Amino acid sequence: MKNKDKPPELQPFFDKNIAGDVVPSIGISMPRIDAYAKVTGRERYAADYYGFDMIWAGVKRAGIPHARLKSVNTQAAENLPGVIAVLTHKNISGSNRQGVIRKDQPVLVDDKVRHCGDAVALVLAEDKETLAKAIKLTSADFEPLPGVFTTETALEENAPLVHEDHPGGNVLLKASLEIGSVQSAKEHCDVLVEACFETPLVEHAYLETEAGWAQLKEDGKLEIVASTQTPFRDRMEVADALGLEPERIRMIAPYAGGAFGGKDGVTVQSLLGLAALHANGRPVKMWWSREESFIAGTKRHAARMYYRLGAKADGSLHSLDTRLYFDTGPYDHLGGVVITLALEHSGGPYRIPNVSFKGWAVYTNNPIGGAFRGFGVAQVTAAMEQMMDMLAEKLAMDPLKLRLKNAVRKGDKNCVGVTLTHSTGLVECLEAVARHPLWTERAAWKSKAGPFKRRGAGIVALMHASGYGPVVPDVANAKVELTAEGKIKVYCGVVDMGQGNAATNLQIAGSILCQNVDRIELILPDTDRTLPSGSASASRCTYTFGNALIGACETLKLRILQRAADLLMVDDCDETALIPGAVRHLPTGREIPLHRLATFMNESERTATQRFRAPTAKEIPPVGNEIRLHGFPHTLFSYGAHLVRVEVNELTGVVDVKRYLSVSDCGKIINPHVYEQQIQGAIAQGIGYALSEEVQVNEGKVLTADLATFIIPAASDVPEIESQPVEIYEPSGPYGLKGVGEIATNGPLPAIANAVADACGVRIFRSPLTPSRVLRALRERLSEGGVH
Amino acid sequence: MQLPRFDLKRPSSFHEAVRLLVEYGNAAKISAGGTDLLPRMKYRIAAPATVISLKRIPVSEPFQDSEGNLHVHALVRLSDAASSNLVRTNAPALADAALAVGSEQIRNMGTLGGNVCLEPRCHYYNQSHAYQFMDPCFKRGGNLCYLVPKGNRCWALACSDTVPALIGLRAAAVVQSGDREYTIPVEELFTGDPVRPLCLGETDLITDIVVPAARPRTAVVFRKLSPRGGIDFATVNCAVMLKLSEDREACEDAIIAIGAVSGKPMRAGQAEKNLLGRKIAPDVIHEAAGRTASEIRPSMRCDCSISYLRKCIESLTQAALETAYQRASSGDGVKPD
Ligand SMILES: Cc1cc2nc3c(=O)[nH]c(=O)nc-3n(C[C@H](O)[C@H](O)[C@H](O)COP(=O)(O)OP(=O)(O)OC[C@H]3O[C@@H](n4cnc5c(N)ncnc54)[C@H](O)[C@@H]3O)c2cc1C
Ligand code: SF4
């Protein structure tokens, strides 16, 4: 069954914006340029690329968690009519290894299988049906090996090794930091609280599962369209893995249908590249099924976290001792970076003079732990913010006052020893919560719970770093062009995975160059057309790229005005102004249309580029170089405070989230609408993390491999969410902005756990807070003779 | 995920459907709404060479016969069953149960007959086997169980929402078997073995569900507990029937049916018996709920513990009994003598 579609156009598809005649300005809610095409189904995601003579590629996955690969039997599949090729590691001439920091993940298994989702063979077939049959016919001989499925067992002395060649054994990375001394905490603290928290493995569950399309062009160039957050890094990874020169590869990144970190790194790219190299120039498509995405894709790390927090009787924090164990699965992916960011945030946004933080990213034969919105911070915030409530209870202090007392302010050193030189609005966030009726009137609301119901309110304080930290250059390169037709092209270097940064780029360019939406075209990330600008991750997209874009637009603006001044024979370009489609000489009203002006300008004159590198912390806290390489420490943070009201059903253990308030300091806002979307979406995702989402794994095999068993919130599970920005100007940000992409994801789990504890008088240390766990905790509490 | 290839037959009567079943035997499967069958086909746990779709068979509206019995066609869509006035007034528990199934879209496709014949479910079984758990378990014709590795049988769960309600209503199924037609109480349809869950013959089809005329001072109530506000299969569901004595104080007849916790819907026989003749009061209801929870044995499963299920059974039964008592004693929803 051949595809009869026309050959694909590789131009990203854009539709007319509904508000095409609007000249954007900063600070207003504009409809997103991508909205119309997306809601009408016309946007072309990577999963929507087909084409004439296209073939399908798919993967034979190991299905067992740990084994030595003896051989792959491809013959039966190759004999099947309609099968084009069955490829194994033997067909790969490059390193056959992928990874961001430690390159430890094979494209196709050569020595050992390390988790069920490992790719053993790559099959190319004329159609999907043949592909499925051929994958089934492909088999492998394995010598099964004992596996490690918990961080505890992985760290035992004689534990089976996931990577025999790794000097650290099953410890991918150990990060630690010591400031002051926690040894004598017992003597110096009036109260100590201690606990161990466990958070689950979680799936991103984006709408668009991992997908892509590739073709080897006649000129020898390998073109790959993928749903990815990292086209420029992917190009290097694919080149290295497959043994190609990077310039032979062109990566194109359309809007992604959701990513949340799950596409921060290679998914289908190398496999597709390999397939295209064996497809005689025909286009190849790969699109993982939901189940495949669950089994082979990355997850949020499951974590076990030991905390000991000490304070003085007046509530001032004195010491914190933490040990964090993150299950990174079989490959680094970004596990080392995740544990490092977790370590940095493990003491929360507080001043604590004595800390000892230790973190281990541990190899196991479970699914791959990787990037997920929150990036390690979601886990440690869950622990630290519950510790703060436990401490408040022990001190008989109001939990909000306790947080306010210890909250970092501008100029303070945070608990990892970095002086906060940028805007620091945590106190303002907490004060806004303190004033809000959802907080001030909570006692009355709680007392009206009704029979068999208990009500509670919980709060948390949040911080989230943005950017890559000190070593890996956190750089963006923007490019804008006045086209020969007199329009503006914005070359976006950073992927828009749904968060709306592409539309924000348009807003920035339109406002500086005073052009209406219809006169601006966005070029989405493409290694041949746009400039490298790093990943769509780390709450950095608009901060870093926006800064670069402002510079590029200002340069182009000046050039346009100067050229127009010359042509109009006026002295000073101060007398001219850009208006939609033209430049006007203000004193005389004479105008020169941009398309005329463009004809007088050389191509190089019509484009402007600008590089921006994000600031880094100048202090050197006492950590090894290895940890600095993994991104420690940061200098720029967003802050927030959340409040939630819940109702717990005593009979069923069901936690009903009734109301949610988020106050955030993410700097000034360019588009309030997009900002609000980030907050709302993150909270909905966080509610899932708090209450129901858990990838259940049994000896490395995923039990919840679809959306019927992996329970994400439905519309009816998400309450009314109120979002209040605390708009503090951040001088280093574009128009005073900071990152808003991740911070709100970190709040719901600890906030809800605190609210449940407030409602029921019991704390549940293992999340998600499923009805079964809540009910068990309630019963244990009752049988202890506690309150009824 | 794509459907495998299959041959589609579209008979226009149950008669013809049965004839096709005889002709194609094991290689054919019946699809009514297809909402249970098609996902299984996508996962390749069902791979019939021929699918016999019942979509062309004319569906009659629910009607009442001269004795007041309610006849509901097996191919009635769940959304229609839920909104039918006749069903709502004569068998509100059935309407509630139909409305509790899945989501709007599922109810618009799924049928009552399909819901009654829903395949038992298990985390290991209801998933793609292309990536893991490749060796077939008992339910896929193999010789092992992933859930209970040392066991020698299957523990998949019968999750239908309407079945407990139909048991509470003492409904019966009309079955077309060859040229013959027979009637069997819904409760007796189930073997308890999740691998061959139905007592029906290979070529038998359910054509109608008959709910006996509502009795005075009687109420049947359905309750369901599931993870989310919608879409999910029950963690536990429950239907209770309560008939009161003429003075509307004592219990004259009772059914407590619990679904989704084992290979077939369960009755709490002891708890029911214990209610008979007793004056209904909060402590009696509480006791009955407690007895139900201790007598029903939930099967092991992946997503929650047995002790949690017990507790849920107790709360659900209690809530259902309370409502049933209120309705039966006030005459709400019950036809006059
Ligand atoms: C997302 C989702 C959520 C769901 N949630 C629920 C839920 O909450 N509760 C619930 O109970 N179910 C649920 N289901 C399962 C299913 O949709 C319903 O049970 C539905 O009622 C099945 O009816 P159908 O007509 O679509 O069945 P089909 O798929 O057509 O058939 C189901 C089975 O019954 C057999 N069959 C159908 N009709 C007859 C007949 N007349 N005589 C004999 N055998 C017959 C078929 O051969 C098949 O084996 C859900 C399904 C999905 C996909
Ligand atoms: S209970 Fe066991 S045999 Fe039955 S479906 Fe599940 S894994 Fe298979």
Image: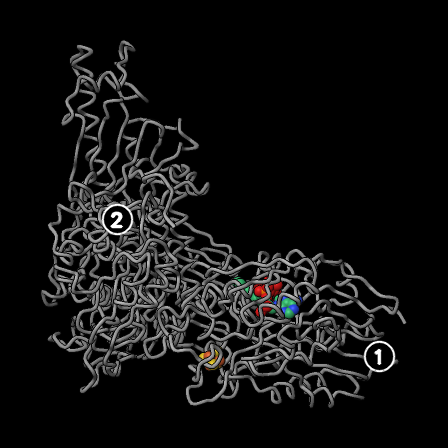
Q: Where is residue A493 in the image (x, y as percent from the top left)?
A: 23, 43
Q: Which residue is drawn at 21% across and 44% down?
A: A732
Q: Residue B334's mark? A: none
Q: Mark 1 = which residue?
A: B248
Residue farthest along the left direction in this orientation: A625
Q: Residue at x 62, y 75 (%)?
A: B202
Q: Which amino acid does label 2 sit on?
A: Ala
Q: As drawn, is B121 to the left or to the right of A589?
A: right
- Between A608 and A632, the residue placed more toward the observer is A608
Residue farthest along the right direction in this orientation: B337
Which SS class for mark 2? strand
**Numbered disc in front, either 1 or 2:** 2
Quadrant of the image for the N terminus of chain B? bottom left
Q: Is residue A443 above or below residue B247?
A: above
Let me know if residue A758 appears in the view. yes
Which SS class for mark 1? loop
Q: Mark 2 = which residue?
A: A214
Q: As drawn, is A569 to the left or to the right of A679?
A: left
- Give the chain letter at badge 1: B
Residue B18 sits in quarter: bottom right
Q: Where is residue B203 in the image (x, y as percent from the top left)?
A: 64, 72
Residue B92 sits in quarter: bottom right
Same chain, marks 1 and 2? no
- Give the chain letter at badge 2: A
Q: Residue at x 33, y 45 (%)?
A: A255
Q: Which amino acid does label 1 sit on?
A: Arg
Q: As drawn, is A122 to the left or to the right of B209?
A: left
Q: Is residue A169 above or below residue A60?
A: below
Residue A286 sits in quarter: bottom left
Q: In this view, does A326 lie above or below A560?
A: below
